[in-house]
Image: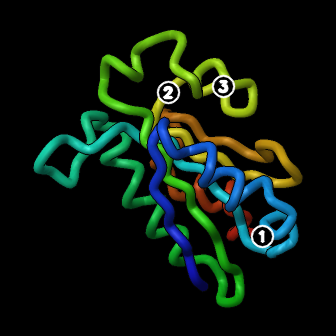
């Protein structure tokens, strides 16, 4: 199983999203498509300013690696910005109806041009919930 991880910021998210999720090639490539919205990393650290992100991120990566052989995935990690940027009620990913973010981390499985499943900040660290979102449990 191969996981392609791509990092995006507010500035370059649109181009990455179009290429990986919305293009005709992406629609037919058979990969599990995931969006992971995270807080920005603290300068000089591997950790984010969001404690929930720091707990959920390793769980999500571990469960991705446990996907069955032959199931490839693309993970677009979208960094929401620093804390003041994220706290703005007009943050682009809060108001975009495709994502309608309420918290970070948020993990979304994208299928057929829309969010097919979602885990918010209160569930993204739970292995069984991540497995269910990935479809790893029953496939």
**Residue at 15% in and 50% down:** 45
Q: Find numbered disc 1 in the image and state the secondary structure of the residue it sits on.
A: loop
Q: Which mark is residue 138?
A: 1
Left or right: 124, with 20 as reference point: left
User: In the current view of this chain or complex, which residue is farthest to the left?
Assistant: 44
Left or right: 23, with 20 as reference point: right
In this rendering, which labeled residue sits more in front, label 2 or label 1? 2
Q: Which mark is residue 29?
A: none
* Vertical placement of residue 98 versus 69, above or below: above
Q: Find numbered disc 2 in the image and state the secondary structure of the residue it sits on.
A: loop
Q: Find numbered disc 3 in the image and state the secondary structure of the residue it sits on.
A: loop
- The first of marks 2 and 1 along the sequence is 2
Spatial CA distance of label 2 from label 3 is: 9 Å
**Residue at 67% in and 32% down:** 99
Left or right: 81, with 6 as reference point: left
In this rendering, which labeled residue sits more in front, label 2 or label 3? 3
Q: Quadrant of residue 119?
A: top right
Left or right: 132, with 94 as reference point: right
Q: Which mark is residue 100?
A: 3
**Residue at 64% in and 56% down:** 34
Residue 118, given in percent of the width and then of the height, sits at 67, 42
User: In the current view of this chain or complex, which residue is farthest to the top?
Assistant: 89
* Vertical placement of residue 124 versus 32, above or below: above
Q: Residues within 10 Å of mark 1 (few under 14, many from 20)?
A: few
Q: Quadrant of residue 80?
A: top left
Residue 116, given in percent of the width and then of the height, sits at 80, 46
Residue 120, given in percent of the width and then of the height, sits at 56, 35
**Quadrant that contains the N terminus:** bottom right
């Amino acid at each position: 199983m191969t996981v392609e991880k791509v990092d995006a910021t507010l500035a370059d998210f649109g181009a990455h999203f179009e290429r990986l999720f919305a293009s005709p090639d992406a629609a037919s490539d058979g990969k599990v498509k995931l969006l992971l919205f995270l807080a920005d990393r603290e300068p000089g650290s591997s950790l984010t300013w969001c404690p929930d992100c720091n707990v959920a991120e390793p769980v999500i990566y571990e469960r991705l690696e446990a996907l069955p052989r032959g199931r490839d995935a693309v993970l677009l990690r979208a960094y929401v910005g620093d804390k003041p940027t994220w706290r703005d009620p007009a943050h682009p990913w809060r108001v975009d109806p495709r994502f309608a973010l309420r918290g970070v981390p948020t993990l979304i499985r994208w299928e057929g041009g829309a969010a097919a499943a979602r885990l918010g900040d209160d569930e993204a660290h739970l292995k069984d919930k991540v497995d269910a979102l990935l479809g790893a449990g029953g496939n």
